[in-house]
Image (tube, rainbow, N blue to C red):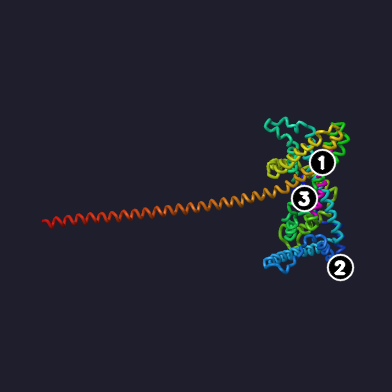
């Protein structure tokens, strides 16, 4: 259910990447067509392609310059000037990329109409891949629902030790969350890199990477978007209420149908969730054709000599639904390897801060609260049909808040955890190190001062002792000499 937000986003879909050249017949036809064009016609076609790329593909990544207010302070003017300089530089790079891609695409025999059609194909393939992979990632959650239906004793909590009996209401949500966490964790490798119209920042030219970061939604917007998209599960619950209520007189049939809708409907709900999130990514310019044409080669090259973006573009042209289905089968066949490779990591993730917040607090606690509300809402209703309707609708209404809280916890917890880790590592650790260094330095200085004082005191004592001894010796010798003098005088 929350598989989409945990899915690593990548560049060219693995195994969906394609042949590195257009079919020979098409290439020959294109070469003949290009050869028949006059230089003026060639330049005109390049201009048309470049204009299409600038006005339709890269338009959302161009930055508008900020005007300078008359009453702006010198500091504000400098800030605006720096912003406009960066924006101008980025815009120029995007225009240069568009011009370069236009020259290469024209040599490939492509027109701006062909490019529009290819990007539309990529959008359809991406949407299909997102829906399919998201439905697959919902299977552990659905399996938890079926397991609890088949083994009711799990939720009764009779197997818990006496001190843990009060935790019984948390079992349902905790089990579902744990199975989802581990299940989607081992699916990360299988469902990763399925999108053509997305790319990691390190694979993009600077202007595109900067735009990706600049236009990324904040935590509040992400929470709002995901909290709205996840209501596809609420729609599933409403459907379940509509179907289960007429079966209230047949408890076993009702339970079976309710479980089936919860499980299979969950797959459809997660697919709808993925589709909705793709719409928000398009809105925020986090996906689109610019992420195909804005790629850079791993090794720095002149724009006209880059090939990785062209391989991605050709991959889209050569892709087909049958090929996508075949590659999906290959990915599923590799699931056992993914389980062996990532299984232990997925299990360890259960004790992460994000998992404990999402699955322990939001999901387990939330569903426990929903169950209590259902109990209170139906406490005085005796009619089985009315009781089922009220219970189901209460579940649908209350669970909508739980689902929104679940996705919000996933959005907020990770950044908070990273911030806390950064504080501990760079703040508290640094402060502790600085404090230890300060105390150590002061202690060393104090020890040196004490040692110096002791040495000076010892020297003083030695000097004073020597002086006193010398005075004593002088005094004794003087007294002896005086005694000798007195004896001589008497004689």
Circle 1 packing at 10 Å, graded few (<14), some (14-19), many (20+), is many
> How many discs appear?
3
- Residues shaded magenta: 261-282
Q: Secondary structure at mark 2?
A: helix
Quarter of the image with the C terminus in it: bottom left
**Where is mark 3, residue-wise?**
224
Residue 389, percent across and down? 85, 37
Circle 3 packing at 10 Å, graded few (<14), some (14-19), many (20+), is some
* Closer to us: 80 or 316: 80
Mark drawn on residue 396 = 1
Q: Residue at x 79, y 32 (%)?
A: 150
Going from the N terminus, do you reach mark 2 or mark 1 first?
Answer: 2
Residue 69, percent across and down? 73, 67
Residue 320, percent across and down? 85, 50
Going from the N terminus, do you reach mark 3 or mark 2 first?
Answer: 2
Instruction: Find out whether residue 270 is within the magenta segment.
Output: yes
Q: Residue furthest right?
A: 246
Query: Is any part of residue 188 visible from this angle?
Result: yes
Which numbered mark, 2 or 1, is in the foreground of this view? 1
**Where is mark 2, residue-wise?**
41
Residue 134: name its quadrant: top right
Q: Is residue 326 left or right of residue 346?
A: right
* Gap between marks 3 and 2 measured at Cα: 50 Å
Mark drawn on residue 101 = none
439 vs 180: above or below? below
Q: Residue at x 86, y 57 (%)?
A: 117
């Amino acid at each position: 259910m929350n598989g989409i937000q945990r899915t690593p986003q990548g560049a060219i879909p693995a195994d969906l990447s394609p042949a590195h050249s257009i079919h020979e017949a098409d290439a020959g036809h294109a070469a003949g067509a290009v050869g028949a064009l006059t230089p003026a016609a060639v330049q005109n076609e390049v201009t048309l392609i470049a204009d299409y790329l600038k006005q339709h593909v890269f338009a959302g990544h161009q930055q508008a310059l900020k005007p300078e207010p008359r009453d702006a302070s010198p500091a504000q003017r400098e800030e605006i000037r720096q912003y406009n300089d960066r924006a101008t530089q980025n815009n120029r790079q995007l225009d240069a990329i568009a011009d370069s891609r236009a020259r290469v695409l024209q040599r490939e025999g492509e027109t701006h109409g062909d490019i529009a059609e290819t990007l539309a194909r990529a959008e359809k393939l991406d949407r299909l891949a997102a829906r399919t992979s998201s439905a697959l990632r919902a299977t552990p959650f659905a399996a938890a629902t079926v397991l609890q239906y088949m083994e009711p004793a799990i939720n009764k909590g009779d197997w818990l030790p006496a001190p843990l009996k009060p935790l019984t209401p948390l079992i349902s949500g905790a089990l579902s969350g744990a199975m989802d966490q581990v299940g989607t964790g081992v699916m990360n490798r299988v469902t990763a890199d399925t999108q053509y119209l997305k790319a990691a920042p390190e694979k993009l030219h600077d202007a595109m990477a900067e735009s990706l970061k600049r236009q990324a939604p904040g935590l509040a917007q992400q929470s709002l978007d995901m909290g709205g998209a996840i209501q596809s599960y609420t729609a599933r619950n409403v459907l379940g209420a509509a179907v289960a209520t007429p079966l209230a007189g047949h408890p076993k049939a009702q339970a079976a149908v309710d479980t089936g809708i919860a499980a299979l409907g969950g797959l459809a709900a997660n697919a709808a969730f993925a589709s909705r999130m793709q719409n928000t990514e398009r809105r925020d310019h986090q996906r689109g054709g610019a992420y195909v044409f804005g790629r850079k080669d791993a090794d720095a090259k002149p724009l006209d000599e880059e090939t990785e973006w062209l391989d991605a573009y050709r991959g889209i042209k050569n892709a087909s639904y049958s090929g996508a289905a075949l590659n999906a089968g290959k990915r599923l066949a590799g699931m056992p390897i993914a389980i062996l490779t990532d299984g232990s990591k997925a299990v360890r993730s259960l004790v992460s801060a994000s998992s404990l917040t999402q699955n322990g607090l939001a999901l387990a606690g939330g569903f426990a609260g929903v169950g209590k509300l259902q109990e209170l809402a139906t406490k005085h209703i005796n009619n089985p049909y009315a009781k089922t309707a009220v219970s189901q609708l209460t579940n649908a209404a209350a669970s909508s808040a739980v689902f929104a809280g679940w996705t919000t916890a996933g959005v907020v917890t990770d950044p908070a955890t990273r911030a806390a880790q950064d504080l501990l590592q760079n703040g508290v650790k640094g402060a502790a190190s600085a404090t230890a260094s300060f105390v150590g330095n002061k202690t060393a200085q104090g020890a040196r001062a004490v040692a110096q004082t002791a040495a000076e005191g010892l020297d003083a004592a030695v000097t004073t002792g020597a002086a006193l001894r010398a005075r004593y010796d002088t005094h004794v010798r003087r007294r002896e000499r005086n005694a000798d003098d007195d004896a001589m005088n008497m004689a």
